[in-house]
Each structure stands twice: as C-alpha cells, then as structure tokens.
C-alpha cells in the first residue's frame, strides 16, 4: 500500500524494477540527483500514459506542471511541493502517488543540480502536452524520432549533465540520445496493445511489429557499442542494466512473449 510519507527511494523501488538497482548503487548526491530526475520524469510520464484521462485534460495538466516548474527552476525551494497542490487537486483520485508527489521529487535533488532537473522536466512536460493535444499522431519516421527524443532521448542528455556535475565525467551526448531512443522504442514495441487500447498509435504508417523492433534494435546496438567502452563507474550501471533488459525484452518479443519473466529480470540486474 502506498503511504504519503514513503521516501523517494522506496517509491522508486515500487515504480521501476529497471532503474531502482542501478540508482541504489550510486554514491550519495549522485543517487539523490538521479532518483530525483527519474521520479520527476516518471511523474509526468504516468500522466501522459494515463488510460482514462482525456487528452485535453492531460495536455492542460502537463502545461500547468511545466509552468509551475519554470517558476522554481532557478531556486531549490522545498515549498515547490505546495505549488502543485492546487494543480493536482482535481486529479487526486485519478493519479498515482509518483505523479501527485512531483514537488517532493523536485525538492529531493541536491541544490546545485536541481535547476537543471526541474528545467528539463518542465521542457518534457510541455512536449508531452503537445503530443497529447495531437493524439500522438505519427505520420512518418521523423515524427517517431521527434517523439522518442521528446520523452526519452532528452532524459539521456540530462543524465550527461548530472554525471558532469557530479564528478566531471564527459559522457557521449550522441550515445545518450541513442540510448533514450532505443529504450523508448522497446517500450513502444512491448506496450503496443495497451497503447492502441487508449487510442495512441506510435507506428509510422505501414510499419509492422518487426519494423519497430528492428528500429529499436538499431539504436540499442549503437548504445551497446558505446557502453562497452565505459569503465566500471557508478554511472555506468545506469546504462548497462537498462540496456541489457531492453535487449532481452526485444528478444522475448521476437519469440512471441509479451515480457521477461521475473527470473530473467533478476538474472540480468544481478549479473
């Protein structure tokens, strides 16, 4: 059962089996910054993907969130949680805890990196609002690339900024975009039926399941080439574990299975 006093890492563990382990292994401050970024973006992702909220409600809510974050994007202020209360009030019974506590996740970030996390979350919320307004209308591959950048590749770029802030690491920003695209395309392939059920079709006209899986594999392959060059460092787990899970998920889909088994997941994350 969710509890309003659960700390961010407890909520993270419930929310993501993919990212909890690599984040929990990070040293202090890097752990808080990465958890804050993940939870902020998961909060708005749950709004975009909500199965029953009308698209106009999603768009309006995401725009309000974007503006509220801009008001705080240059100061680390715990009162940000209060700013979201009137925004979320009409949706309190519809949205999950991870969305309703967006202000808590923003305030959890270390002060020096908080403006970057809030600014990028604001930009992503605005882009998600656009896609909700247009009913995720994908006309061709360029639209698909724009969407995967909007909601995932931009996260990879934020992770580059967090790594540089923490210890001066210079991650390849092109690889970060490849990583985000590959993960999002894998999610699209895995969630095809659920997306169609809520009226969202991310496939360009004429694309088959095999086309989409092949496109996802292309970006994951580019990411894997880069990942092999990374030294064993706190941030490398954030790339290597989700990458391995995504590659295994594509293989499972190719075999006609909807998702990985729990044992398969545990084997990958504990490797």
Image: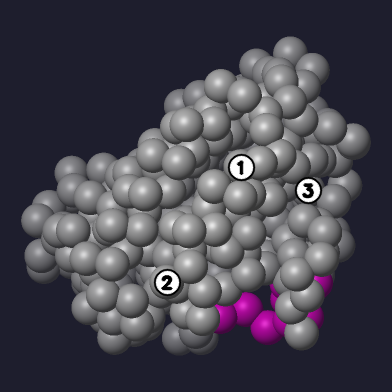
In this view, 29 is above or below 91: above
Q: Main secondary structure of the magenta part?
A: helix
The stretch of residues the image draws in magenta is 259-266
Q: CA distance from mark 2 to mark 3?
A: 32 Å
Percent of width and height locating residue 124: 40, 43
Residue placed most toward the observer, 65 or 126: 65
The residue tagged 2 is 90
- Based on the picture, tell me whether residue 261 belongs to the magenta stretch: yes
The residue tagged 1 is 80
Q: CA distance from mark 1 to mark 2?
A: 18 Å
Residue 160 can be seen in this image: no
Percent of width and height locating residue 79: 66, 41
- Per the image, label 3 sits on a secondary structure element best described as helix
Q: Residue at x 9, y 56 (%)?
A: 139
Residue 216: image quadrant is bottom left
Q: Is residue 257 left or right of residue 79?
A: left
Give the class, few, some or many, for how many residues have Cα within 10 Å of label 1's Cα (few <14, many ≥20): many
The residue tagged 3 is 23
């Amino acid at each position: 059962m969710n509890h309003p006093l659960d700390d961010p890492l407890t909520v993270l563990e419930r929310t993501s089996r993919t990212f909890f382990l690599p984040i929990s292994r990070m040293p202090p401050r890097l752990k808080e910054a990465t958890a804050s970024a993940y939870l902020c973006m998961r909060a708005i992702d749950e709004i975009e993907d909500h199965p029953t909220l009308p698209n106009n409600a999603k768009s309006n809510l995401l725009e309000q969130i974007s503006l509220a974050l801009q008001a705080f994007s240059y100061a680390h202020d715990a009162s940000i949680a209060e700013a979201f209360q009137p925004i979320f009030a009409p949706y309190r019974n519809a949205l999950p805890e991870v969305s309703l506590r967006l202000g808590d996740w923003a305030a959890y970030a270390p002060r020096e990196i908080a403006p970057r996390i809030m600014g990028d979350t604001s930009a992503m919320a605005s882009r998600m609002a656009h896609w909700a307004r247009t009913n995720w209308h994908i006309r061709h591959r360029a639209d698909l690339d724009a969407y995967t950048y909007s909601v995932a590749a931009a996260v990879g770029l934020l992770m580059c900024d967090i790594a540089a802030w923490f210890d001066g690491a210079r991650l390849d920003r092109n690889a970060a975009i490849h990583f985000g695209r590959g993960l999002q395309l894998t999610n699209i392939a895995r969630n095809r039926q659920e997306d169609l059920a809520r009226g969202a079709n991310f496939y360009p006209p004429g694309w088959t399941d095999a086309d989409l899986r092949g496109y996802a594999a292309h970006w994951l392959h580019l990411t894997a080439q880069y990942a092999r060059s990374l030294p064993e460092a706190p941030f490398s787990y954030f790339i290597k574990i989700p990458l391995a899970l995504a590659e295994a998920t594509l293989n499972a889909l190719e075999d006609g299975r909807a998702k990985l088994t729990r044992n398969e997941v545990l084997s990958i994350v504990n490797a």
